[in-house]
Amino acid sequence: MNADDIAAGRARWQARYDSARKRDADFTTLSGMPVEPVYGPPEGVAYPGFERIGWPGEFPYTRGLHPTGYRGRTWTIRQFAGFGNARQTNERYKMILGAGGGGLSVAFDMPTLMGRDSDDPQSLGEVGHCGVAVDSAADMEALFDGIDLAGVTTSMTISGPAVPVFCMYLVAAERQGADLSSLDGTLQTDIFKEYIAQKEWLFDPEPHLRLIGDLMEYCAAEIPRYKPLSVSGYHIREAGSTAAQELAYTLADGFGYVELGLSRGLDVNVFAPGLSFFFDSHVDFFEEIAKFRAARRIWARWLRDVYGATSEKALWLRFHTQTAGVSLTAQQPVNNVVRTAVEALAAVLGGTNSLHTNALDETLALPTDSSAEIALRTQQVLMEEIGVTNVADPLGGSWYVEALTDRIEAEAEKIFDRIRALGGDGPHQIGPMTSGILRGIEDGWFTGQIAEAAFAYQQALEKGDKKIVGVNCHTGTVAKELEILRISHEVEVEQRRTLAERKRARDEGRVRAAVEAMVAVSRTGGNMIPAMLDAVRAEATLGEICDALRAEWGVYREPARF
């Protein structure tokens, strides 16, 4: 790019920066030295390829979505939490918010993630252990008791039964007296990544996509600020993928959901801003920064050039980040504080919009209050003390970071080509990327690619080519065992007792009629959300709703592969 074009870009950025709201904060170094809000090539100097880097707040958004960077608004501290029953988790949420957390993120237990009630025989021994148990709207009310759902953004990490759980969230908000149209938050809902990596599904892909399409339509019309889809790469990376695979599979899934919206006749400029993303931040510091920068650039270009978006917000890739759970070690677990801090800093330097930092004991159990506080304070130290919020994309222009960004982008584009090729050249019911994803799921292509990457990394660890402190090097320690949080069996007993009482107290005829009406809508082309809301208002349980749909649509069984 020539010097004149670079100067014109800087002038555009300056005008937008000057007119934007900034935080009332001290934007100087620790020694009091003033710093500029962004840095670029020296005045009058040409910079080949600078159009791929650009300025914050303008296409291709490599350097961030906003001209102010974090000077305008810092990232949202959104700590993921959930354990035991709704009352116990509610206490943790109030602790997080009281200690400075800016939003909530709900972790559900395995029965809830699989669309089963706490009294289901398959739930035995799992209730409340890896997250909070939610059986009905009454649990959702208790979960957010004393927390204004109209005043806090809430993320829910659930995909298979995401739609009925979302309906329970809406009914809980109704019962608080909230204006549903003003709710803000994110529902994961990303079923593609379940087939690719996490394996928490209910039905075949097509019924899940039907529900997701209904949810997209409903939110676009009724709850415009709410994001009905958080396309997740986190679980793909935790399953063993490389950074480029995580990026490519996640964005490909996002393109699939764009095709789903378009196939429903929705305006891409209306529904695309409701798509958000969820990435892993692993321990290779610079690779992760490059991944985040490449993600924004790829998304903006594809939405504009492939899917025809013209709205600026439709081109924005907004993402939440969680530090890498798979990088945590049971050996010398206090070292996990350092790993998490480095991973969190990479996410911040990559421009994350919200962030969860893992606790040091999460590889052993659910976090204790003390370890959860350390994880929260890690973000606050980064935000308040080290100066990274003063300058937008401070590593922009680094030869290493820019080369890595280009390299990861190029690798992702090769993977996109391969996925689209899997779908063939014929007509596509939803779109070519969706067809490729569905074929890749059916053939086991995604799981095979991830398994190969995970195997290669494990071999490197066992040979000692890759190092993990406390695991294959520097193994001596004076540390003592940690006290960990244990979930009492009484939690399950109490949850089952409470559920039985709720079932006895409700109007069974009303429940049956509402569930039957929902199933009747599933047999038509109508939107299922209103009927599902009616079932939830009648206190139909999550298991009852999902079992009715399992009876209608069947269940998905992953093909055996060797």
Image (cartoon, rainbow, N blue to C red):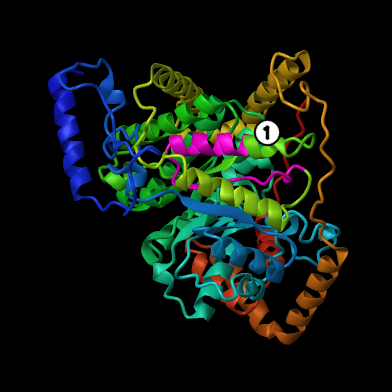
Frontmost residue, 554 versus 407: 407
Q: Position of residue 12 (x, y in %)?
A: 17, 37
Q: Position of residue 192 (x, y in %)?
A: 57, 42
> Measured along the vertical axis of the image, is residue 321 above or below residue 489?
above
Residue at which label 1 appears? 327
**Residue 355 is covered by the magenta coloring:** yes
Task: Name, please, the residue furthest toward the front.
Answer: 31
The amino acid sitting under disc 1 is Ser
The residue positioned 47% from the left and 80% from the top of the image is 177
Is 46 situated left or right of 474 in this image? left
Q: Quadrant of residue 81?
A: bottom right
Is 119 situated left or right of 115 in this image? right
Q: Which span is picked out in magenta?
A: 339-363
Q: Is residue 114 visible?
A: no
The residue positioned 71% from the left and 68% from the top of the image is 88
**Residue 250 is covered by the magenta coloring:** no
The residue positioned 64% from the left and 24% from the top of the image is 449
Is 128 situated left or right of 51 in this image? right
Frontmost residue, 420 versus 181: 181
The residue positioned 61% from the left and 38% from the top of the image is 340
Q: Is residue 409 visible?
A: yes
Quadrant location, the N terminus: top left
